[in-house]
Image (cartoon, coloured by chain):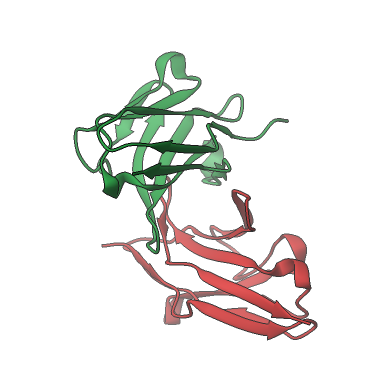
Chain colours: A green, B red
Amino acid sequence: EAGVTQFPSHSVIEKGQTVTLRCDPISGHDNLYWYRRVMGKEIKFLLHFVKESKQDESGMPNNRFLAERTGGTYSTLKVQPAELEDSGVYFCASSQESQGSYEQYFGPGTRLTVT
Amino acid sequence: AQSVTQPDIHITVSEGASLELRCNYSYGATPYLFWYVQSPGQGLQLLLKYFSGDTLVQGIKGFEAEFKRSQSSFNLRKPSVHWSDAAEYFCAVGAGKLVFGAGTILRVKS
């Protein structure tokens, strides 16, 4: 079974540019999460999809961040325009959460550097 | 508010020595607790989890953790550390949205 995949693995962009990160969850997992780790800080929750619906986007830092999950499969996270403080590692995770199991499986992350 | 504290940012142990990584949590209900490990260049891998039942849980790679409700702790242990265990370890709590601790970087000296 394929795990969670993320693309790209690294991205270096200039301030003001746009970047789109992609996450492919484990097949059949309805729940998809985005997290971010800024250098030296904790991993922080950004948002949660259940299928194609946003269940919780309380962690999204501002309206420069837009997440979508069309069709309830893969998800994209767009940052437009990027700022220096957006640099960090963006993780995606998926889970099934049936029968009370809340195990989340993480992708390798996308390291975003904004210069 | 939910929170997780990992008081040790760095820990160095000798290969073959025992290991204990500390984790304290604050959570309003019955906690769902997790330990993840991130090796260099890799994503987060689930080591073990606690939902209910036996408070001593076994995980992969020879790790175990003990849930102590009275101390709000979920410490990770391993009786004999291998050089390949060098990584960063994260404690997390949540049912759905996870709250993570700051992580503990484990160094193993030979």
Q: In which quadrant of the rendered image does the C terminus of chain A lie? A: top left
Is residue B13 left or right of A22 when viewed as pictured? right
Above or below B23: residue A43: above
Number of dots carrying numbers: 0
Above or below B80: residue B27: above
Q: Residue at x 52, y 63 (%)?
A: B90
Q: Residue at x 60, y 30 (%)?
A: A26
Is residue B97 left or right of B57 when viewed as pictured? left
The answer to whether residue A69 of the structure is visible from this angle is: yes
Q: Nearer the viewer, residue A61 or B21?
A: A61
Q: Percent position (x, y) of residue B76?
A: 60, 73
Is residue A56 left or right of A100 when viewed as pictured? left
Is residue B4 left or right of A26 when viewed as pictured? left
Q: Percent position (x, y) of residue A30?
A: 49, 27
Res. A60 image quadrant: top left
Q: In which quadrant of the rendered image does the N terminus of chain A lie? A: top right
The answer to whether residue B68 of the structure is visible from this angle is: no
Q: Residue at x 41, y 39 (%)?
A: A34
| Extreme residue toward the left, this view | A63
Q: Residue at x 27, y 38 (%)?
A: A15
Res. B78 image quadrant: bottom right
Q: Percent position (x, y) of residue A22?
A: 48, 27
| Extreme residue toward the top, this view | A71
Q: Nearer the viewer, residue A7 or B80?
A: A7
Q: Percent position (x, y) of residue A17?
A: 30, 29
